[in-house]
Image: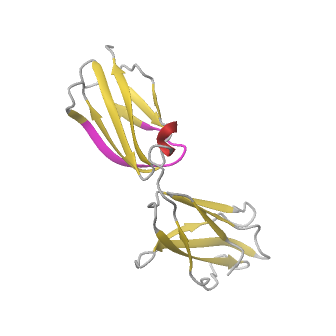
Amino acid sequence: APLTVTATPSATAVRFDWPSYTTNTYMYQIHYRVQGTSTWYGYQSTGYGAPTLAARVTGLTPNTTYEWRVRNACLPVAEDWNEWSSISTFTTGAARLGQELAQLSVYPNPTTGLVNVAGLSGAVNYVVYNSVGKQVLSGEQVVSQEAVLQLDLSAYPQGAYILKVMSAEGVATRQMILTGK
């Protein structure tokens, strides 16, 4: 297994890097888990010819120690995996509440119904409140870094609404205005 893979954690993510594919390496697999648990989660790189030299895993828990291991598959048999490396560890940093979510954007605002929420990644919970503080909409979704969460407010009356978004990165609120059609 390659020994040159490095892990660089942040509060809720880790980036695994390897400088290049070793001779005949077809792809890498990386497994990670919370230290002291038994369930491994994984990442697999793309294959030879279109090599990926990094992997980013998001949605991790702040202030948590994770274990990880890596192995590679070599040509000529692409599914002939080598043994796992010894287990290494990394610890995610402290959450900077609200800092990561500062980039959260809600558009169009005002809206006639459909609202896009951008700047999210990982597992997020959201709640929408009307102007008197009553919860009118809520949900949970896993969002990739580039994806946009879309909320449909068209069934609700015109007025001001508050969107509260909670994730491992923190909590953010945004005001939304729903206008007539």
> Residue pushed farthest top?
180
In the displayed structure image, the side of residue 137 where residue 52 appears, left or right: right
Q: Residue 7: image x %, image y %?
A: 62, 67
Q: Residue 145: image x %, image y %?
A: 53, 47
Q: Residue 122: image x %, image y %?
A: 46, 52
In the displayed structure image, the side of residue 154 where residue 100 appears, left or right: right
In the displayed structure image, the side of residue 18 where residue 56 appears, left or right: left
Q: Residue at x 56, y 81 (%)?
A: 87
Q: Is residue 86 above or below residue 59?
A: below
Magenta stretch encompasses residue 75: no
Residue stretch in magenta = 137-149
Magenta stretch encompasses residue 145: yes
Q: Residue 178: image x %, image y %?
A: 33, 20
The residue closer to the viewer here, 86 or 84, is: 86
Quadrant location of the N terminus in the rendered image: bottom right
Q: Is residue 65 above or below residue 87?
A: above
Number of numbered discs on residues = 0
* Residue 134 appears in the picture as rendered: yes
* Residue 153 appears in the picture as rendered: no
Q: Residue at x 75, y 70 (%)?
A: 21
The residue closer to the viewer here, 144 or 49, is: 144
Q: Residue at x 50, y 49 (%)?
A: 144
Dominant SS of magenta comes to: strand
Q: Is residue 76 above or below residue 111?
A: below
In the displayed structure image, the side of residue 116 where residue 45 appears, left or right: right
Quadrant location of the C terminus in the rendered image: top left
Quadrant in which residue 53 is drawn: bottom right
